[in-house]
Amino acid sequence: MNVEQIFSNNRKWIAERLKIDGNYFKNLSKGQNPEFLYIGCSDSRVTAEELMGVQPGDVFVFRNIANMVPNNDLSAMSVITYSVSHLKVNHIVVCGHYYCTGVKAAMQSADLGILNPWLRNIRDVYRLHKKELDSIDDEEEKYKRLVELNVQEQCINVIKTADVQKANKERNLKVHGWVFDVHSGKLIDLKIDFDKILGEIMEIYRII
């Protein structure tokens, strides 16, 4: 696909939208009121709107390598603050996916230059769950389990933030952990127990 094709696709998309609703773009320009913040991976095979079956305006989307939420990443923290405190989302989803190349790279002993400090966050997840992961003999299953555990730990990082703690208290905002199975197309709910995690970490991470 070349650049010219992209613009051709755009014109076709505009025509299709206007055929269905002549005021589509006029209404779209009025603003956004999403219920969800989606934190996902930048992988080109995984798009939030398609896998969730939603329309533009339904989901506020943030993506990076391996769906990470480091507490010192100002981009991630700003997205959480804006979506929670200004857009007033009621659900935050951290969605990983099986066969994530970022997670795969973190499992390998290799110098990847500027990626090293980023992937170290995933290696820290491995360190936290080393006993469980080392007990898995099948490398593919270990890889998939690390994807799940990484989602879990990023959910915990989200819950640690002041904006999320405040929104949970004021309007019962919830955090969800999902995994997208690239092989089947299915979304898998890891059933993150928000209230249990919040209770366990509040002694140390209580901000409000």
Image (spheres, grey):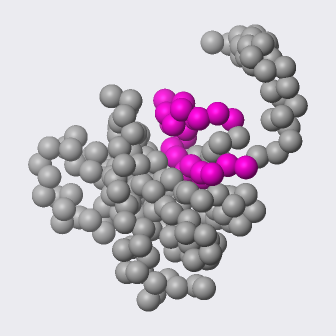
Q: Residue 170, position in %: x, y?
A: 62, 75
Q: Nearer the viewer, residue 189 or 148?
A: 189
The number of numbered discs placed on residues in the rendered structure image is: 0
Q: Residue 42, position in %: x, y?
A: 55, 40
Q: Residue 4, position in %: x, y?
A: 75, 11
Q: Look at 56% across and 65% down and name the residue there.
A: 173
Q: Quadrant of the N terminus?
A: top right
Residues shaded magenta: 33-56
Q: Quadrant of the C terminus?
A: bottom right
Residue 148 relative to residue 166: left or right: left
Q: Look at 55% across and 51% down and name the residue there.
A: 39
Residue 48 relative to residue 194: left or right: right
Q: Nearer the viewer, residue 108 or 92?
A: 92
Q: Look at 50% across and 70% down and name the residue there.
A: 159
Residue 140 found in image quarter: top left
Residue 87 relative to residue 128: left or right: right
Residue 110 visible in this rendered orientation of the protein: no
Q: Is residue 90 above or below residue 40?
A: below
Q: Residue 171, position in %: x, y?
A: 61, 70
Q: Nearer the viewer, residue 175 or 73?
A: 175
Residue 98 visible in this rendered orientation of the protein: yes
Residue 92 found in image quarter: bottom right
Q: Look at 60% across and 59% down and name the residue there.
A: 90
Q: Is residue 144 above or below residue 162?
A: above
Residue 203 falls within the magenta-colored stretch: no
Q: Is residue 174 above or below residue 202?
A: above
Q: Residue furthest bottom?
A: 203
